[in-house]
Image (cartoon, rainbow, N blue to C red):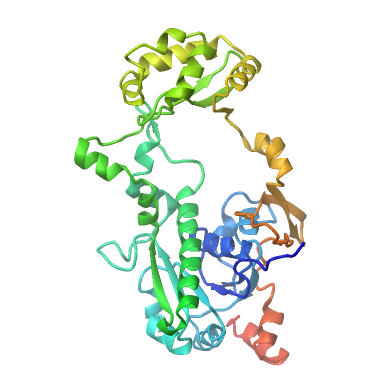
Amino acid sequence: MTTRPPLLKDVRIIDLSTVIAAPFASTLCGDLGADVTKIELPNGSDALRGLAPTTSEHALYWKTVNRGKKGITLDVRNPKGKEIFLKILKDTDVLVENFRTGTLDRWELDLKTLLKVNPNLLVLRLTGFGQTGPYAERPGFARIFEAMSGLTNLIGTSESGPQHPNLPIGDLIAGLFGAFSIASAIASLRRDPSQGGFEIDLSATEALFRLLDPLAVEYEFLGINRKHEGNRASYTAPSNMYQTKDGKWVTLVASSDAIFKRLCNAINKSEWIDDPRFTSNPQRCKNVIELDNGIAGWFQNNTYQQVEITLNESDIPYTKVYDIEDVLKDPQVKARQGIIRLNDAELGSIPAPCAVPRIPEILDIPIKTGPKTGEDNQSFYTALGFSEEEINRLKNEKVI
């Protein structure tokens, strides 16, 4: 079997960013073969090192979010540090940063300066609100993006009010858009190198709003301001979460007419098939409470084992709501090696999600965890042309 090179092989990324969103963008590129070097301040003060999960000795989230990267330290605010940074960028394809808008300009590392050093440099700026507009210089955090995009307003119940997920999903979605932006920019520059490098202005709030495709047109044309409906979908029915007799939670989707008919027969509600309240998805949405009450009653009278047998036999899309233990035990996850082991010098290895997507004939390459502060300083700066004496002096001066 022939093997293909990784998709982003030979793409060199310098990750100057902190915490989650932008680092996740460069990590996703690293999963696909990019050569990513993470730059930290010499004191290792990135807030992610203190974000759960942690142990008394190890920053576990750091190890997963920054997997596969080299790690160096450099204070780019220091004049000597800035000089070294510009030297590094001469041989770099992409710079990733997420400081407040205008920060690099104040450090005399504005776009004009960066492109003068490397005319083909791509600069991903991932901020809360983008490089322009009245909010441009505001700080950004995942829950802020989630709330301001309208996403949070779709989660929760009438009793709870809007709710955030127990994970910084806003950062991760922004990171996905960041990786997509980098790959797109690389493709564009390689198609036409004469265009030179450029800035990629990525607003995390806009990234989240981009996912909410139908909301604006729904509001303008129908006057509907979609809100939180608990687990019930307001746009399709039946689509809800139900609890079995033995306390298991199951999510079920039977929104197409064909699946709905199969569900009716499966739960002994064949009279619903010709009921005008339920003959189309729009009608089912209008009468969803009656529909849900009937389905919920069937679940409450059956154990999960009985539910599983019946729904499988009728080819109804459903699943038990998984926790992480369920994910790790799932035969589909095991068959596809959806959980991989990251090599770690301190812990031996730790579990993490596999690289996505999969490309046939590309060999899996072992991935290590996120680097310790300055882990690769010696090899990196030696390759950059610094002597051991110079490297030691830079350490003593807290430049690196």
- For this orientation, the residue located farthest to the right is 348
Does 286 sit above or below residue 378?
above
Residue at screen point 69% across, 61% down: 362
Residue 240 can be seen in this image: no
Where on the picture, by quarter, is residue 331?
top right
Residue 205 can be seen in this image: yes
Residue 283 picture location, percent across and down: 32, 21
Q: In the image, is 202 to the left or to the right of 339?
A: left
Residue 219 picture location, percent across and down: 23, 40
Where on the picture, by quarter, is residue 136?
bottom left
Relative to the observer, which residue lies in front, 392 or 138?
A: 138
Numbered circles on residues, count: 0
Relative to the observer, which residue lies in front, 129 or 269?
A: 269
Residue at screen point 63% across, 14% down: 306
Does 101 sit above or below residue 174?
below
Q: In the image, is 276 to the left or to the right of 395?
A: left
Q: In the image, is 269 to the left or to the right of 129?
A: right
Residue at screen point 46% across, 82% down: 193
Does 119 sit above or below residue 366?
below
Residue at screen point 50% across, 84% down: 78
Residue 373 picture location, percent across and down: 65, 69
Where on the picture, by quarter, is residue 312?
top right
Q: Quadrant of the N terminus?
A: bottom right
Q: Quadrant of the C terminus?
A: bottom right
